[in-house]
Amino acid sequence: MNDCLFCKIIAGEIPSTKVYEDDSVLAFRDINPQAPVHILVIPKTHIASIADITPENSGVIAHISEVIAHIAREQGLNEGFRVCTNTGAHGCQSVKHLHFHLLGGRQLSERLG
Ligand code: 5GP
Ligand code: ZN
């Protein structure tokens, strides 16, 4: 049984506001946005975090980078934006399915940690 929240969103078992989808990647709005644009970009295959990227599955990361650039253009983030992926306990990762936060639409703080 797969209890992963984001796998359930991919399967359509939990609703989400999708902004992009293709065969291997889904992007949807964060339920608790921390900026005017706050989108989560995830691989459709279950990968727990970026710490689980290997030569066998790293291709999806290159593709996600292209998708992020595409979404940023589409969302009008021409003044800039931030991409981050929280990892593990020290990184405050709460959902254990790899996701990239795409944040923008206002001047973001200089602080990262
Ligand atoms: P993390 O803390 O793991 O880096 O980020 C998890 C993100 O998922 C949080 O920003 C949180 O608001 C978001 N989130 C948690 N549950 C849901 C949900 O059911 N739907 C959506 N769209 N976002 C969620
Ligand atoms: Zn998952």
Image (cartoon, rainbow, N blue to C red):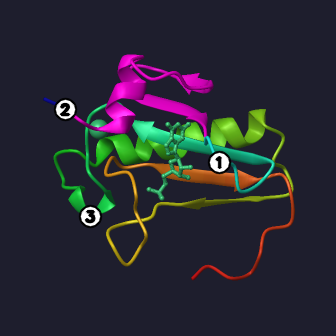
Q: Earlier in the sequence, mark 1 or mark 2?
A: 2
Amino acid type, callout 2: Asn
Considering only vertical position in the picture, is 113 above or below 31? below
Q: Secondary structure at mark 1?
A: loop
- Nearest the viewer among 104 and 35 is 35
Q: Earlier in the sequence, mark 3 or mark 1?
A: 1
Would you say residue 101 sits in the magenta stretch? no
Q: For ligand 2, tell me if the residue under mark 2 lies within 8 Å.
A: yes
Packing grade of label 3 (10 A; few <14, some 14-19, many >=20) is few
Q: Are marks 1 and 2 in contact (CB under 8 Å)?
A: no
Q: For ligand 1, tell me if the residue under mark 1 lies within 8 Å.
A: yes
Considering only vertical position in the picture, is 21 above or below 61? above
Is 3 positioned to the left or the right of 43 in the image? left
Which stretch is magenta? 3-29
Is 14 positioned to the left or the right of 70 in the image? left
Amino acid type, callout 1: Asn
Residue annotated with mark 3:
51
Residue annotated with mark 1:
32
Instruction: Tell me if I can see residue 105 in this picture.
Output: yes
Say which quarter of the image contains residue 84: bottom right
Amino acid type, callout 3: Ala
Residue annotated with mark 2:
2
Would you say residue 7 sits in the magenta stretch? yes
Q: Secondary structure at mark 3?
A: helix
